[in-house]
Image (spheres, rainbow, N blue to C red):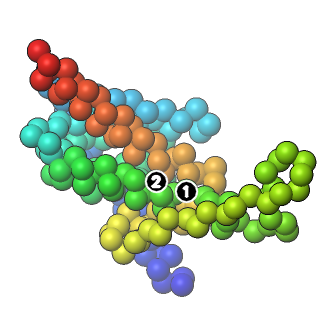
Amino acid sequence: MPGLEDLYREIILDHYRSPRNRGELESPPAQRLEGFNPLCGDEVVVTLEVKDGVVSDIKIAGTGCSISQSSASLMSAAVKGKPVPDVRALIHTFKGMMSIHESTLPSSAAPTDGDGSGATVEQLEPEAIDVDALGELAALQGVVKFPVRIKCATLSWNTLAQGLDESEAASSDAARL
């Protein structure tokens, strides 16, 4: 489908050239998190505010390749204003789309359990991803064809997940006091 691939390429380039939610929020009150991919030098700074269980604001900064920066832009647009459980579900879905499953890779023989017995390992079916539900985020699905670039696409998502974990931990600590 060359038309769809062209559209996806355009979405990625648009978010790279004109990133959404660019900048940093004042920290504190916002949480500031940094993500770094040592394999290629991509850097992302995510600042976010979570109020009443909702990602009320998010800003993205950093430098890197078009995949890392457009993924951060797409992510920020997708999660801003959403409840934390919905954001976590979106993180899970996006990372599922970015996963490479052994069962989808070409192979001349079934994998074995590695103990020398020759017993085959049961293949698990990859989790079904509703790409249509991802909207513009689906533009990044072609990244899985280039495994070395998957870390570029997931850098901001992993950084956001870390921020949500820290936000929940801080809320739990405050509630105990």
Q: Quadrant of residue 43?
A: top left
Q: Is residue 20 visible?
A: no
Q: List x then y, in percent, for residue 88.
A: 31, 49
> How packed is label 2: few (under 14 Cα within 10 Å), some, or many (20 or more)?
some
Q: Could you tell whether 85 is left or right of 5 in the image?
A: left
Q: Quarter of the image containing the C terminus? A: top left
Q: Residue at x 58, y 51 (%)?
A: 149
Q: List x then y, in percent, for residue 16.
A: 40, 54
- Residues 51 and 65: in front is 51
Q: Residue at x 54, y 82 (%)?
A: 2
Q: List x then y, in percent, for residue 166.
A: 29, 29
Q: Pointers 2 and 1 in contact (CB under 8 A)?
A: yes
Q: Is residue 33 visible?
A: yes
Position of residue 175 relative to residue 143, above or below, is above
Q: Quadrant of residue 47?
A: top left
Position of residue 149 relative to residue 123, above or below, is above
Q: Residue at x 48, y 83 (%)?
A: 3
Position of residue 49 relative to residue 28, above or below, is below
- Residue ID for mark 2: 95
The amino acid pointed to by label 1 is Ser
Q: List x then y, in percent, for residue 9.
A: 47, 68
Kind of element beneath mark 1? loop
Q: In the rendering, which numbered label is found on residue 99? A: 1
Q: Residue at x 53, y 36 (%)?
A: 37
- Residues 97 and 135: in front is 97
Q: Could you tell whether 14 is left or right of 56 in the image?
A: right
